[in-house]
Image: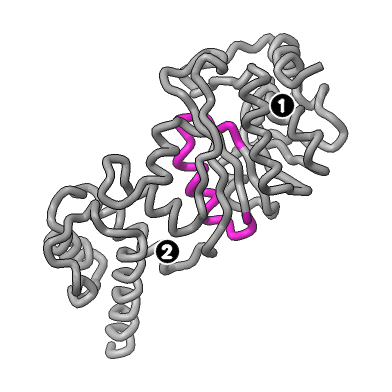
Amino acid sequence: MRAAALAREVLRSAGFRPSKRLGQHFLLDDRGILSFVSAFSEIRPSEALEVGPGPGSLTFEASRLVDRIVAIEIDPRLVRALAERAPPNVAVVHGDGVAAARSWPLSFVYSNTPFNLSSMIIEAIARNNNVVAAVLGVQKEVAFRMTAEPGSHDYSRLSILSTLVFEVKLHSVIPAEWFTPPPKVDAAVVILRRRRKWNPLLELTLSIAACAFTQKRRKALKVLARCLAQLNCRADALEGLEGRRVWELAPEDLLRIAETCSHSRCESAART
């Protein structure tokens, strides 16, 4: 039996209907499931953490490719129904998937993310240095933001987070009609490979970006001077930004600003 049919059996046995309010859009089309799981072949994991398996749409197919899966599901009805039908190499656990993504000691994470939690899950994975790679289903617009270039319409704080921490690849697009119930937008599968470990410098970079991108079309010097003052950093971190706007700054520019800011903080602390 194919994965989509098995997932429908789980939903029937749980007497469960997906809730739009909770962001539950289950991938119940085998074409979408195979498209998603085909991204695993680029990673070849032996163990995996699945965040939010729902009725197991991806779980059943992934279990053929991965030796051991820990699937974290927050809805107890789905936990019980999926656990009854899960293959022996899948452990279904009741819990908060976002919290698990932030701390679980497995090197590979995958998730057909609830759209209202996509950014939180991406950031949780970024902060968990145990995670070396991930395959995520997100809104297509979120995938565009993750891969956006400086100066483009989609360029954002999420772009900076994603590209500083990961190599990001847009693997495939999954039409909305392959989900039950269909969301209002298409989804996309992205592959993440870690390029930097999370550290205090990245934390500071993201704080600067969060402040600056509230006014991303304004001149970078003026906006960043205000942001750095709030962070107790000297303005000499802004040399070379004349004439550029916030949304034209590359992630590496913001990382350099954060590094200069960090040094100025250390010098200031040493003098006191």
Which residue carries the number 1 mark?
79
For badge 2, the amino acid type reads Leu
Write down the quadrant of residue 263 in the picture: bottom left
Left or right of 12? Residue 125 is: left
Q: Position of residue 147 (x, y in %)?
A: 42, 46
Residue 114 on the magenta span: yes
For image coordinates 82% across by 22% down, the residue present is 85
Residue range (magenta): 111-132
Real-space Cα separation, disc 1 to disc 2, in angstroms? 36 Å
For image coordinates 81% across by 27% down, the residue present is 86
Label 2 Cα crowd, 10 Å radius (few <14 / some 14-19 / many 20+) = many
Number of the label disc, if any, that sits on residue 202: 2
Q: Nearer the viewer, residue 96 or 182?
A: 182
Quadrant location, the C terminus: bottom left
For image coordinates 42% across by 45% down, the residue present is 146
Left or right of 201? Residue 169 is: right
For badge 1, the amino acid type reads Val
Of marks 1 and 2, the one in the foreground = 2
